[in-house]
Amino acid sequence: MKNRHLEHPEDAILNEGRAGLYNILDFLEAQGSKATVKYDGSPAIVWGINPDNGKFFVGTKSVFNKIKVKINYTHYDIEVNHGDKPAVASILHMCLEKLPRVEGVYQGDFIGYGGGNEYTPNTITYKFDDTVEEDIIVAAHTTYEGEILKDMCASYGCEPIASEEVKFLDTSAEFKSRNYRIGLYIAAARVAAKWVTFPTEEKGRQLKTYINSYIRMGLPLDAAKLAKETKFDKSLFQLYNFIIEIKNMIMEGIVSKETIDCFLDDKKSDHEGFVLSNKYGTYKLVNRHQFSYANFNLKKKWDK
């Protein structure tokens, strides 16, 4: 599986119904999960040695496109594939020059060019204690394994990469505590599920779009109001909010190993969230009313 799009845990009950609920509860209950920091960089960069031909390449997530694959071995390739987006092309040109030629394939978020100490690649502003002396800043978070590029599988987490020209941020995170109520809430959710009506796949997509519109407008996910407007079972939305509470409690116990100050709208904030992975799957844990709302309403800076 490629690291192209991660789901929110609460959306599992809309995507997969009752089966999705039981899997996500197992996911949230599992011990020994691996956590990484979800940096708010843009764009996502994929780079490394292509196992198909042994050549070094850079690209965006379009490296994994099924139809029009955009993989760049040279500066000419970058202009052909990304010349219509000069800001992205400029970033890729620098990445082609500066990213280390190490074995393997990696993915990370581009934070910015060196020479400063404050960067806002997307919605969050990152402030470093000192001026960044390296040429570019990248938050590497995923490694890929496999003998054929298109079939490679993602592994979340990335060992430190040595480089004098790239400042690689430490994306690792650790569990400092776990609220005892998490287990109680999960047990309660399993019981409550017996009386919940779950949507079909098509209806789930519609409800997901509706919920996203609430978040986009900064509105609270009021179960009664959502049930009335969508003409669907109120208990589903209550369960949806319940899973969000469990997710938030888990997030409270995770901390980043990298010391960096984060700001949103000039106010001190936490990181955007975390990516959690275990045998039940990989999901992103994000405070959606804070960060998803901001992402929905801010045009990507690198796409201007």
Image: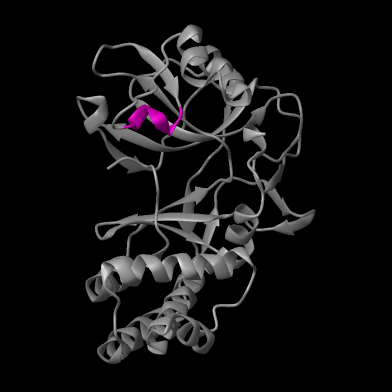
Measured as percent of width and height from the top left, residue 114 is found at 69, 25
In the drawing, does residue 101 fall left or right of residue 49? right
Q: Is residue 115 above or below residue 76?
A: below
- Going 47% across and 27% down the picture, which residue do you hit? 161
Asked if one can make out residue 14 in the rendered structure from this viewpoint, the answer is yes
Q: Is residue 137 part of the magenta span, yes or no?
A: no
Image quadrant for the C terminus? top right
Q: Nearer the viewer, residue 301 or 27?
A: 301
| Secondary structure predominantly adopted by residues drawn in magenta | helix
Q: Is residue 276 above or below residue 193?
A: above
- Going 40% across and 17% down the picture, which residue do you hit? 57
Asked if one can make out residue 271 in the rendered structure from this viewpoint, the answer is no
Q: Is residue 233 above or below residue 163?
A: below
Measured as percent of width and height from the top left, residue 240 is found at 42, 77
In the drawing, does residue 278 fall left or right of residue 118? left
Q: Nearer the viewer, residue 116 or 257?
A: 116
Image quadrant for the N terminus? top left
Measured as percent of width and height from the top left, residue 120 is found at 70, 41
Which coloring applies here?
A: one colour
Q: Which residues are magenta?
A: 60-65
In the drawing, does residue 68 fall left or right of residue 87? left
In the drawing, does residue 241 fall left or right of residue 131? left
- Going 65% across and 30% down the picture, which residue do you hit? 112
Measured as percent of width and height from the top left, residue 236 is found at 38, 83
Q: Is residue 43 above or below residue 206?
A: above
Q: Is residue 62 part of the magenta span, yes or no?
A: yes
Q: Nearer the viewer, residue 275 or 213?
A: 213
